[in-house]
Image: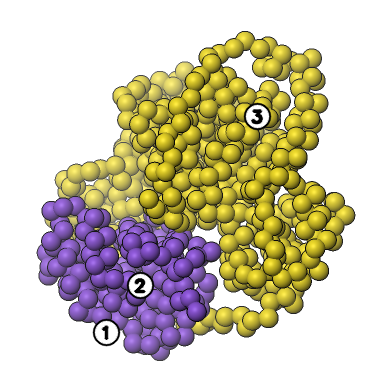
Chain colours: A purple, B yellow
Amino acid sequence: MEKPIKNVIIVGTGGQGVILASEILCDVALECGYDTKKSEIHGMAQRGGVVSSHVRYGAKVASPLIAEGTADILLSFELAEAARWIPFIKSDGRVVTSTQKIVPPLVSTGIATYPDQVEEVLKTYSKNPIIVDALSIAHELGNPRLVNTILLAIISDLLDLSEDAWKKVVSNRVPPKFRELNMKAFDRGRQLSC
Amino acid sequence: MKKVLSGNEAIALGVYENGVRFASAYPGTPSTEILENYARYEGVYAEWAPNEKVALEVAVGASMTGARVLATMKHVGLNVAADPFMTLTYTGVSGGFLLVCADDPGMHSSQNEQDNRFYGRFAQVPMFEPSDSQEAKDMVAEAYDISEKYDTPSMIRMTTRISHSKGVVEVGDQPVIKREIAGFQRDKKKNVMIPAFARLKHPKILERVKGLTEYAEITPLNRVEMGDSKVGIVTSGISYQYVKEVLPTASILKLGLTYPLSEKMIRSFAANVDRLFVVEELEPYLEDQIKAMGIPVEGKKYFSILDELSQDLVAKGFKEAGVYDQELVKPITQPEGTDMPRPPLMCAGCTHRGLFYAMNKLKGIVHGDIGCYTLSVLPPLESIDTTLCMGGSISMAHGTAKAIEVLGIEDERPVFAVIGDSTFFHSGLTGLLDVTYNKSNVTICILDNGTTAMTGAQENPGTGKTLQNEESVHIDLKQLVKALGCTRVREVDPFDIKGTIEILKEEVAFKGPSVIITSRPCVQLLKYEPHDIYDSNKDICIGCEMCQKLGCPAISQGDEIPSPNTKKTKRHSVIDTSLCTGCSLCLQVCKPGAIHKL
């Protein structure tokens, strides 16, 4: 039987690099010979709002959307966003999230509250969530923008796409002078997966 | 070679490969990237027109030289362009004419979710609906051929999920077609729509539709995928993909051409299945026409008119209809407290913020418009009272002020219109003409941030640059406003709250129309590091939250301020200095002087 379609939902807030990450994943899937589709919303959402990108790959993909309860992987660039999108993961789906918090003004002005105990929520609703301080690691490696590569490297270890394809696509997507640093970040990210 | 392309990128590529070298458009989500991508190809001419009506007319004029042309716009843009469009269908075309129009079911970035398939039927033009990026590219060639063969504009109707979804497309397999262009040929009976000539044209449309209907029966864009004959589904566009996902073994009639409909094909398909369904987003466009053919069909009973569809909604609909026998996926219920609202916001350093903060002090009636500044409706600013359509703010303000004046309504509040530069060029000019001509007491604020910001910073007649980055005139808003009969024009620096309040007060006190133009560029255009950055001093901050009333994403609440006397807990304001762009508004509103230059 054909391998089922893989569903990866990548989420965060406007300007974090969610769209770029999903484009890289799509290109890796294509590089590995799969059909792939992705979908997200542009426009208003980019003004600091919620951003989600759906990526799917397999022998033949019909819908560009992932249905709730069917995502194999939920990758979040922001802690509370991981909890928001929990309804998308399937029962044995994996959650990978950065611990970075981006607090919206509605919270800072007391109108809404930032969810507490997000890590506990993630542990309750998903199997072995991978919760990493990707921003600190990126800073440690010398550039906060490496968060994208670190997070992608973690999910690369959970997906059936070759490491070579990942490295090829990531290399092509970053400016030549940052290639080496990104490869270092990628290797570091792979170690964080479990 | 295969590449992952969005529907919009695929359209741009298809248009380029077909040797089309002329395009005009006005940006609008989700259509904007079509022209942005097309403009990058070598040897093409692409322009941002001031609005969709102009864009369409420009394309008509270019088509009259025999060249193939492209016009693109979002769904509501076609309302603006409907006037030329509804008569273009009479004149027909010279060079192939393609209108690509993108609907926004679910209103991700729009003021309504109208179904523009009705425009295809209304204008009686061939309407193509792709179901993915590859089809979007492939349909372009067909749309141009049909346009020329039947002397009609063609329309490709996209939706957000086709425009902005990416899929695998075969690229580089087509050499770019070179086309001969005949030049402008005089043909008054064809192109001058006086009643006598237009009357000759109307029957030609009916003939054309007859021809197109025959085409609809044979084009491979309409195809039957025969499977299990118990259930037959007529579908098109993105809905086709959801149906394939949910009922892969059902019989499907996939329509790539949704005007005119292939009636014979639909009849024979209906006759070959036990139960006929239509799965379509928004209105029962196909369903009603199939019912009118006298064919029993089910659709909107199970698939909502509201919002987008998705495979889960399609599965749910078929489950209710009793034809989907699998268990519906039961997702985890949203864990309590995890659905924190995170609405889109004006950026840190947004040039609109200061103006709205100042305007709130005057407690007026504020007519808003379409652009980033619409976001000022949300807390904490909550400044604008209305938003209807592009350019509507000024005319609506005129209507409100005039009604108060002539109908004897007791209302002392000042009446404001707030409109961006690009929106003013789009369709604010005529509203201002009405204000000056019919003399109303309104204060109009043109938020000139030097770009079309909401759709991603496109050039416009006020920026001094064209879409293809050529130097051009830089329309002087002040002179323009004066030329439209408004002699009172003021400029304000929206980063100077006190100065802005003063000028607003003066203009409100003036009885008659006045225009205030803000003079700071969009913060997204700043490519350099900010000169000044501000921070808050914990020891001085008293937690009064004045700075937080600005709704700046860089300012948030920090630690509690220990104090035994207050009932309400007070917290320090904290500035995220990595987000600060140095607009200094927080400095200006901080009375205790806790905010300082870093």
- SS for callout 3: helix
B479, B315: nearer the viewer: B315
Residue A127 coordinates in the image, percent (x, y) = 38, 87
Inter-mark Cα distance, 3 to 2: 50 Å
What kind of residue is marked 3? Lys
Q: Is residue B296 above or below residue B333?
A: above
Circle on res. A194: 1
User: Image quarter for residue B560?
Assistant: bottom left
Q: Nearer the viewer, mark 3 or mark 1?
A: 3
Is residue A53 among what the camera can see? yes
Q: Which residue is mark 3?
A: B149
Q: Chain of mark 1?
A: A
Q: Is residue B291 above or below residue B569?
A: above
B397, B76: nearer the viewer: B76
Mark 3 packing: few (<14 Cα in 10 Å), some, or many (20+)? few
What kind of residue is marked 2? Leu
Q: Which residue is mark 2?
A: A75
Residue B139 coordinates in the image, percent (x, y) = 56, 43
Q: Is residue B120 above or below residue B198?
A: below
Q: Is residue B324 above or below residue A23?
A: below
Q: Residue at x 75, y 34 (%)?
A: B211
Residue B111 coordinates in the image, percent (x, y) = 57, 49
Quadrant occupied by the C terminus of chain B: bottom left
Is residue B490 among what the camera can see? no
Numbered disc total: 3
Mark 2 packing: few (<14 Cα in 10 Å), some, or many (20+)? many
- SS for callout 1: loop
Q: Residue at x 25, y 43 (%)?
A: B526
A140, B510: nearer the viewer: A140
Disc 1 or 2, which lies upstream in sequence? 2
